[in-house]
Image (tube, rainbow, N blue to C red):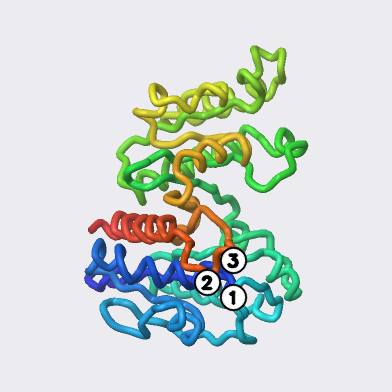
Amino acid sequence: MNTDAALTIAITTGEPAGVGPELTAVALAHEVRKRWPEARFVVLGDRDLLQQCGLASAGDGIEIEHHALAVPVEIGKLNAANGCYVLNLLDVAIDGTLDGRFDAIVTAPLQKSTINDAGVPFTGHTEYLAERTNTPRVVMMLAGSSEKPLRVALATTHLPLKDVSAALSIDGLVETLQIIDHDLRAHFGLARPRILVTGLNPHAGENGYLGREEIDVITPALERARALGIDAPGPYPADTLFQLRYLKDTDCVLAMFHDQGLPVLKYATFGEGINVTLGLPIIRTSVDHGTALDLAGTGRADAGSMIAAIDAAVTMARHKRGV
């Protein structure tokens, strides 16, 4: 990669009937260009659709890389005929980042059902990125903006609650902590990240009376991680951990399952938060919300999360390049 070249960020515009294309246009037209005048942004999507959303075709560090829709879009209405179009945007961004053409990817929201209805089995962005980059383990981390820097990573992601306990293992938790520790150092510039770890059960198991996962799995994993030089205290009861006195000197919280950590983070940061996939060989950030079909085309969708996701992608790419 040419370290003298301008940072180049690919933006996939996601579900064409949703808010992704317009939020991309709003974000680039205003705040992002002021914050990162030295960066170059390549927006992947249908040129006519993006121009209708207010994005100029080129200039001022912004380029539209045209990929034609399969069928015309009716804003707010899903159409499975465009499912493969959405997936193609993601493939182009992944390949371009692996090849060094892009320094990072920012993904606007997509609709999983549309891709599945198009005949392509699809679980989500995170799982697809892991598969396409041959990454055996990735970690989902949601984060607030620079003004609300709370970060929450997940030991498990989209699982039924009844399956969470069986999905936790000592080796898996250690590997997850290693990924978080490495990426917070490499992409966020943190010299020695502090990662607070929740228990799984109420009151972190109450010394085994409310479950033994803390004793049999989580505590041994934390002991092994600390022996590797990772600052990972815990396990803490999740219902009391999210207080300023614990979080003020903390860089990340590792929660055991999706709805243990994310409701707190989204309550504190929704509309300004981002999703970051840790552990990949490439940088990927995203918004913290879905396609918002009911808001598409109304002008009422808030671009705050898209702006924050682009900010994070540029910042992480700068750390990776050492600039």
**Foreground tag (1 vs 3):** 1
Residue at 41 percent across and 29 percent down: it is 231
- Mark 1 / mark 3, whichever is N-terminal: 1
Amino acid type of the residue that numbered disc 2 sits on in the rendered structure: Gly
Amino acid type of the residue that numbered disc 1 sits on in the rendered structure: Ile
Tell me if I can see residue 210 in this picture. Answer: yes
In the image, taking residue 275 as reference, residue 124 lies left or right, namely right
Instruction: Give residue 297's mark.
Output: 2
Observer-nearest of 246 and 98: 246
| Quadrant in the picture for the N terminus | bottom left
Mark 1: secondary structure: loop
What distance separates the C-alpha of mark 1 from that of mark 3? 14 Å
What distance separates the C-alpha of mark 1 from that of mark 2? 6 Å
Residue at the spot of label 1: 75
Crowding at mark 1 (Cα within 10 Å: few <14, some 14-19, many 20+) = some
Amino acid type of the residue that numbered disc 3 sits on in the rendered structure: Leu
Residue at the spot of label 3: 110
